[in-house]
Image (cartoon, grey):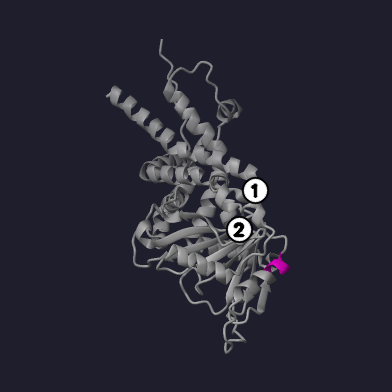
Amino acid sequence: MKKKHYHKKKVSFTKKWSAKLHLWFGLSVGIIVFIVALTGTMYVFKDEIQNVLRKDAIYVKAETINQNPLSIQVLKEKVSLEMNEKYPVSSIEIQLDKNKSYEFLYYEKNKKAWNYFDEVLINKLVYVNQYTGEITGIYNEKYDLFPILKAIHWSLLLKSDWGKYVVGIPTVLFIFMLITGIILWWPKNKKARKGRFWFSWENVKTWKRKNYDLHNVLGFYASFLALLMSITGIYFAYPYVKNTFNLTLSGSLDLPKEKEIKSPDSLMIKNTSVFDLTAQETRKLYPTSSSFRIPLNGKNKKGKELKNIPVTIYGQEGRYSERNTLVFDKYSGKLLKDKPHQKLSNAEKYANANYDIHTGSYFGLFGKILWFITGLICTSLPVTGFLVWWGKQKKQGKKI
């Protein structure tokens, strides 16, 4: 009697190549995906953790609140004198909550550096009681845990301008891994579908099978949010991704360029209270906002000289999506432009919101928790994936 031969069903072309790409990409960039996912996950609750650790610096003493705040210029001079840094104070962030301190920031970059520690010349945050001028806390952000985590996540501690591409390329490959992973996960029929949505470990004793299920099931549930996190990540790295968003949302490849406003009072002697005038007007126009930031050294983030004083107003604490801008004459403090969040184009609104979407803060505390869990799963995928491959290699080796 002839034995019956059971032939395995042929694997489709799509699944065959998906499996190969999934494996090749995973082995080539798995370690970078692991590092980027881990540091991003650890960064999610930065604000909540720092608010607890820096509570004494952030909140001023209750008995001092009844006094009038000192002039920003006076406070700036006090900070400069006490800190005795060779670099000037970069900016001040003022919370509209009267119980919270003013935040003075020192920040300078070295354009010729090749790594994070050489690139950031100084990054210090100084909390000051605005009613007394007392410094309540000094934090060297350059060596703080969260900025370092962010630098690893953003550029693997390489110079930010080109280090983002070192992270960006593996992130693009990770997007392909997620897509091919979904294709490989997709069940052929209803019977196969049951074991794809959850773990069926009643009769499973081997770690290999459990590890495979962890990679397969958790990877599926995390893949959709992971895709969103990855796309919003490469939005920062690649101009063509940003341009695609701009074109889709507003019909133009580029965001509207800010026209330089010529200062009408440029021949005037600079008013020493110019920063207080800008702060006073900002509070008046946006009384329900969370905080606002004023540059104090006359330079923008790229180190170029500012013709005026742009004030950035944040609508909600811990979020950058709802952002308003005021522009003041840097000599007289006269209001030159008011650009509220509502008047921004869709592309501009998204540009402001991308960071919040990437970190999950756009969706509040629930979003952060969800992003944190997804980040943990993404961190585990290179590990469980490698173990799946390693297990198959050992099995093949035994047969030989």
Real-space CA distance between mark 2 and mark 1, rounded to the nearest whole angstrom: 12 Å
Front residue of 124/101: it is 101
Q: What's the residue at 51%, 15% (across, down)?
A: 203
Per the rendered image, the range of residues in magenta is 282-286
Q: Which residue is mark 1?
A: 363
**Label 2–label 1 contact, CB within 8 A:** no
Front residue of 75/334: it is 75
At mark 1, the secondary structure is helix
| Type of amino acid under label 1 | Phe
Q: What's the residue at 46%, 34% (across, down)?
A: 11
Q: Quadrant of the N terminus?
A: top left
Q: What's the residue at 40%, 31% (across, down)?
A: 388
| Type of amino acid under label 2 | Tyr
Q: Which residue is mark 2?
A: 320
Q: Quadrant of the C terminus?
A: top left
At mark 2, the secondary structure is loop
**Mark 1 Cα shell of 10 Å, populated few (<14), some (14-19), many (≥20):** some
| Callout in the foreground (2, 1) | 2
Q: Taking 48 as reference, is 274 above or below it?
A: below
Front residue of 189/70: it is 70
N-terminal of the pair, mark 2 or mark 1, is 2
